[in-house]
Image (cartoon, rainbow, N blue to C red):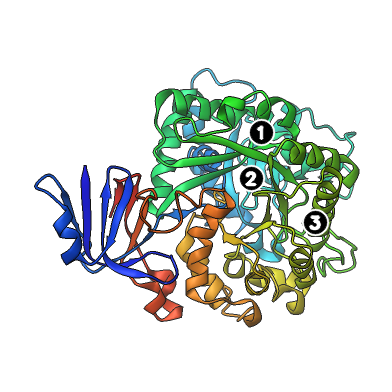
Amino acid sequence: MKTLFYNGNIVTMNNHIRCDAVLINDDKIISLGKYDELKQLIDSNTKLVDLNHNSMYPGFIDAHSHITGVAFSLAFPDLSKCNSIDEVISTMKNNLNEYLNIKDKKPMQFFVGENYNNNNFINQTQPTRKDLDKIAEDIPILIVNISGHVAVANTLALKRLNILDDIKDPIGGKYCRYDDKTLNGVLEERAWLDNVSKIDLTSSLQQQIELLKKAQNYYLSYGLTTAHDGRISPLELNLLREAINQKILKIDVNGYVDVMHYSTLFEDNKDLHNYVQHVKLAGLKIFIDGSPQERTAWMSKPYLLPKGTINVGQNHWTSQQIQPVMNDALNKCYTVIAHINGDAACSQFIDCTKEAIKTINKPINKWTGIHCQFMTKEQINDLALNKINLNLSFFVSHVYYWGDTHIANVGFEKAKNISPSQSALKNKLNFTFHEDSPVVAPDQILAIHCAVNRITKNNVYLGAQEAIDVYNALKAVTINGAIQYGEENLKGTIEEGKLANFTILDKDIENTNPGEIKNAKVIATWVNGECLYHK
């Protein structure tokens, strides 16, 4: 069936071309140009869509998030608005009845709270197990930091996880302690990430499916037409397999298997190396380091806080551990993405990538550095000089959410260079933006706003030299995202032959006051020629 979109401002993202009408047939774009010309190509069965002078863009592409993680998080109390430990305790208590009403609870079915942000607390103090014991001592309780890299367990939860006072810290992680050396319940990096799969997050697979449906609608409400799942373990794969069985997904999901499960989940599920009912295992994910706002990202120089300590964060793997995996992936033409925040983490991944290219004698394809918060100009120049085709995906909204925290943690001179988009642009490297949901909402409009304005929550102008223009920021959430996934022949621009994926906004953000970009609203989201969201 044909559909004609007209009476709008259509931004094709193809060499600055704009038009006022687009004609599609089923899920493909067949023509674009002037309305008076395209209306000659329609018939009585053609559907007409009046854009009412709104602006149409290629469907926004999510370069990195955790859509199944968003689904799971919808089942738990949201702690992101809490401004103190007391508010965390109160919010958890207010939601306790939902947990108590679950029948036939399993021993590892914890009462979980999501997205507490200790950077909003006095002195950025972390809650401890004793704080969570105030909620309940006879229920295993866990709260997860907004970064996803830290969690806090109460006393019973620690026992259920078999985390006892004599436990040793894992490489790349830490079991934090009180002054008397007993566990305080704070689990950093691998101490948390290696334990998360032991926890029963929901009561049934069908409940997870219903949550995934809500997560998909959530993404659509932000104009996203392609999604990402950035750390797949057996739990996430089981849910995605069921989503395939029930045919519930309408947006494409590119999933990346956690390197811990590389030889099993990725290589044993080769049927998913291409899309099946919108699900694809696109490659493998390596965590190199942690979170800069929690001071666990791996830096070349110590953080300024807390004073009197020497802390450069944590690396999860040695180069000797990850090099064979990267070599094998390149040899088999598999895609690798790596979580790299600190400059030391960026160096390790770049060096290991170079070594893989040298050893296997192949160029990389679709490999991506995720976050790249403190990647330096020198590192970016090095990638360009050596023609290393590494995509860089910036969590540029860090400028707003945690820019002030980074200033306190590392100083203004270093903080002003986070998410170095202009440096990537000057060096002609492909770069994208993402929101790392469920860390924050998958709001690509805010990402564009932050890339252009670089204003923190406290109204500090953080790094004018790394600001970019609106058009290149739009590319980062459209065509550049398609390039990152190797799908530029199907997505990312409004052109004949490409998929009819569109994001319709109430503003032409290239011709909007830069400070007002964040106020643009998604009016509708079209995927494969179908309107899946309309405000």
- Give the amino acid at mark 3: Ile
Counting residues from the start of the chain, the first of labels 1 and 3 encountered is 1
Q: How many marks?
A: 3
**Residue 392 higher or lower than 109, as above or below:** below
Q: Which residue is mark 1?
A: 137
Counting residues from the start of the chain, the first of labels 3 and 2 encountered is 2
Q: What residue is at 50 percent from the left and 34 percent from the top?
A: 275
Residue sitting at the far top = 104
Q: What residue is at 50 percent from the left and 59 percent from the top?
A: 479
In three-dimensional space, the C-alpha distance between marks 3 and 2, rounded to whole angstroms, equals: 30 Å
Of the pair 140 and 299, the residue shown nearer to us: 299
Q: Nearer the viewer, mark 3 or mark 2?
A: 3
* Position of residue 282 measured from the top left corner of the image (x, y, whole percent): 60, 39
Q: What residue is at 39 percent from the left and 73 percent from the top?
A: 509
Q: Is residue 133 visible?
A: no
- Check the picture and name the quadrant holding the N terminus: top left
- Give the amino acid at mark 1: Glu
In three-dimensional space, the C-alpha distance between marks 1 and 2, rounded to whole angstroms, equals: 18 Å
- Is 480 left, or right, of 405 in this rendering? left
Q: Which residue is mark 2?
A: 144
- Is 255 left, or right, of 32 in this rendering? right
Residue sitting at the far left = 44
Q: Tag 1's secondary structure?
A: loop
Counting residues from the start of the chain, the first of labels 1 and 2 encountered is 1
Q: What residue is at 74 percent from the left and 66 percent from the top?
A: 384
Q: Nearer the viewer, mark 1 or mark 3?
A: 3
- Is 246 left, or right, of 432 in this rendering? left
- Give the amino acid at mark 2: Val
